[in-house]
Amino acid sequence: MQLTKNFSLAAATIVGAGLFAVSAPTVSADTTSNNDINTVVSSLSNGNSVYSDRTLQESKYGMSKLAKTAIKTILNNRSAAKSVVQKLGGKTAANAFDRNFGAISSELKPLLKWADVPSQAVYDATYRALRGSVSNSTAVSVANALAEGISWLI
Amino acid sequence: MDNELIKLALSEIAESLDDSYEKPVSLALILGQIGANSRTFKDILIQTRVKLINEPSVDIQNMSIDDFRSFFKYIDTHFERVNNETILAVLNYLAKSYIEELTDVSKKLTTEFKNN
């Protein structure tokens, strides 16, 4: 199977409010190509970034109010946060998040006192909480999923 | 120590640990060696899961090395010119440490590549 590079330049359609769910019609001369993969890659090729405008906007550093609201949501809604971690980081990451929720909460709470809370601070706090108790790759997965997924939580 | 020396030192350490595309020792090092940055590292973890693993319409088991190169290329254009070994190294490390769902396809592609 070969991916054709003849991707459609037609505008991608943002599906619902999904941050990543973007699809675009593809025009392929190769009938053996995987159209689903084409659609995925086509959606990525539509712009310079893999993110939709909304995601880009929300992922900018300094979105303090957004981050604080998300942190409060994490602290108050463990299952919703676990669900987001699972979607972005996988099952192992979600289980590690759940098992170490107390430690993660303890690291995230002080961030609420900060004037600005960049997503990197959420990453660092989560990684710090997990360091030593889970493997490095699992700690990275959880921290990355939580930091990237905070905009999903509000 | 300047950044270039740090990169060289990490490459030497990796080599001493028998770094290879079949058994890469660090995803961050692979990305650093092709000129990517930490943003790419994070994007690859998230986007691979969201766009490929979580997407039921995508059959990752039938993706080729070129498919993955195309996918990674739109996360970071540095992937446009990387060789097949680098794509396999990324896949093998992702499968080993971050996205176990890639295990079967990474093994299959590595075996096919070695046999060709």
Image: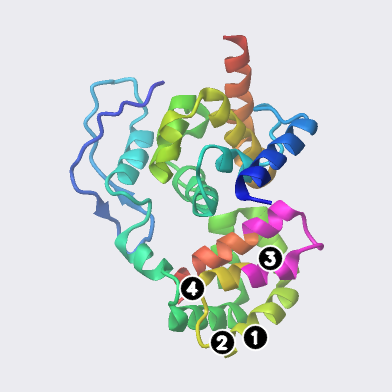
- Chain under numbered label 4: A
Number of residues whose C-alpha sits closer than 10 Å to that of mark 2, classed few (under 14), some (14–19) or many (20 or more): few
- Cα separation between marks 1 and 2: 7 Å
Q: How many marks do you count on the picture?
A: 4
- Chain under numbered label 3: A
- Cα separation between marks 4 and 3: 19 Å
Residue holding disc 2 = A114
Instruction: State the residue in front, B76 or A74.
Output: B76
Q: Which mark is residue A110?
A: 1
- Cα separation between marks 4 and 1: 19 Å
Q: Earlier in the sequence, mark 3 or mark 1?
A: 1
Secondary structure, mark 4, is: helix
Would you say residue B58 is visible in this rendering?
no
Residue holding disc 3 = A127
Going by the numbered disc 3, the residue's amino acid type is: Tyr
Q: Which residues are magenta?
A: A124-141
Select label 2 or label 4 by which is in front.
2
Q: In this view, which residue lies farthest toward the top? A: B116
Q: Measuring 24% from the left and 53% from the top, which residue is drawn there?
A: A13
